[in-house]
Amino acid sequence: MRAAFSAILVVLGCVFAPPALVGFWAAAGIADTGRYVEAVAPLAYDPDVQDAIVDRVTGVITRPLRKRALSPAEDLVHTLVQAVVRGKEFPAVWEDINRVTHRRLIAILSGEDGRVPPVRDDTVSLDLSPVYHPVKDQVNSLLQRELGGPLPDLHPAFELFSSADLVKAQTAYTWLIRLKWVLPILSLALLTAGVLLARDRQRALLGAGLGLAASMFLLAAALAVIRDVYLPDYVENAMPEAAATAVFDALTGFLRAGLRVIFAAGLVVAGAAFLACRRKRASRDHQPAAPVNDVPAG
């Protein structure tokens, strides 16, 4: 009975480990605007993200040009947009774009969306207007005669999430944030209690280490499935797959680093427990046999 109870505690500790890590990541890396922006800031230099922005803004500008039979100007527009995206001021613009988007995202997830401006078309989007407007002004200046009027005030964007979907995720998000410390402590407490209550603590520690490593492996597998299977379908019409993958990798970097650390720690603990079990068994096998007293016959 004691051994079964110990095993149950160890299993529960391993089961709680992945959601504990995900909750801590959500609270530390996703909920905080500053850390979120810090995570995505390097994407300003990512070629896939840059190309996606250039293509989206260029497409928005050249659409009205085609209607005015100015298709040859598309190359000029592409060059102008590319110059903005690859300019020295773009990283700061990229951070501002993501800061605004993140605040809107968290406002909806936390149920405080009434405090921020409404979202166009009921979606949370990465608004590329700060890239569009300087190019629009240059196009208006260079093609003033050919245009016959200024370009319209458009808002190119990458549509990221439906507000309705985010509202559905409010409960899960709220509980992950609330339990960001509870789940890790609970997981560690269950593992510790399971090992201490076991009759053979070395074997229990071996099981705990292997179980913890296995739980992190499953979490890594789930992230891989989301990245390679679910994500391409989700962003099919919103953002190029290569750019979306780069964003996903940037946002989950802290989570993947954490699971690698815990996976390695689990293997180290399991390895140490395995060596301890072997030493214990070897010392038991090498103990001299107890002397047998000869009983005189008759």
Image (tube, grey):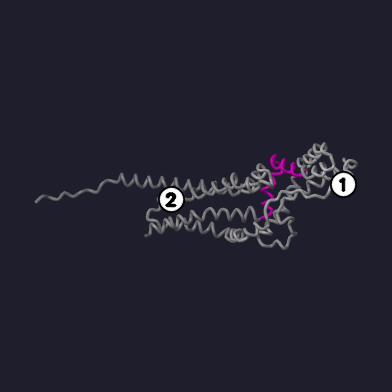
Placement of 182 over or under 278, stated as above or below: below
Camera-nearest residue between 90 and 188: 90
Residue kind at label 2, given as amino acid type:
Gly
In the rendered view of the protein, which quadrant contains the N terminus? bottom left
Residue kind at label 1, given as amino acid type:
Pro
Camera-nearest residue between 241 and 194: 241
Rate crowding at label 1 as few (under 14), some (14 to 19) or many (20 or more) other CA atoms within 10 Å. some
Query: Looking at the picture, how far across and down is residue 18, in whole percent?
Result: 53, 53
In terms of secondary structure, what is the magenta stretch mainly? helix
Is residue 43 a member of the stretch shown in magenta?
yes
Magenta part of the protein: which range? 32-57
In the picture, the disc for residue 150 is: 1
Q: Is residue 96 left or right of residue 220?
A: right
Please name the residue shown 63% across and 52% down the image.
29
Placement of 115 over or under 205, stated as above or below: below
Is residue 13 a member of the stretch shown in magenta?
no
Query: Looking at the picture, how far across and down is residue 187, in whole percent?
Result: 50, 57
Please name the residue shown 80% across and 37% down the image.
75
Question: Residue at label 2?
Answer: 207
Q: Which residue reaches farthest right?
A: 145
Camera-nearest residue between 294 and 31: 31
Please name the residue shown 68% across and 57% down the image.
163
In the picture, the disc for residue 103 is: none
Query: Looking at the picture, how far across and down is residue 221, in whole percent?
Result: 54, 46
Q: Secondary structure at mark 2?
A: helix
Determine the image quadrant of residue 136. top right
Query: Looking at the picture, how far across and down is residue 243, in whole percent?
Result: 67, 43
Q: CA distance from mark 2 to mark 1?
A: 70 Å
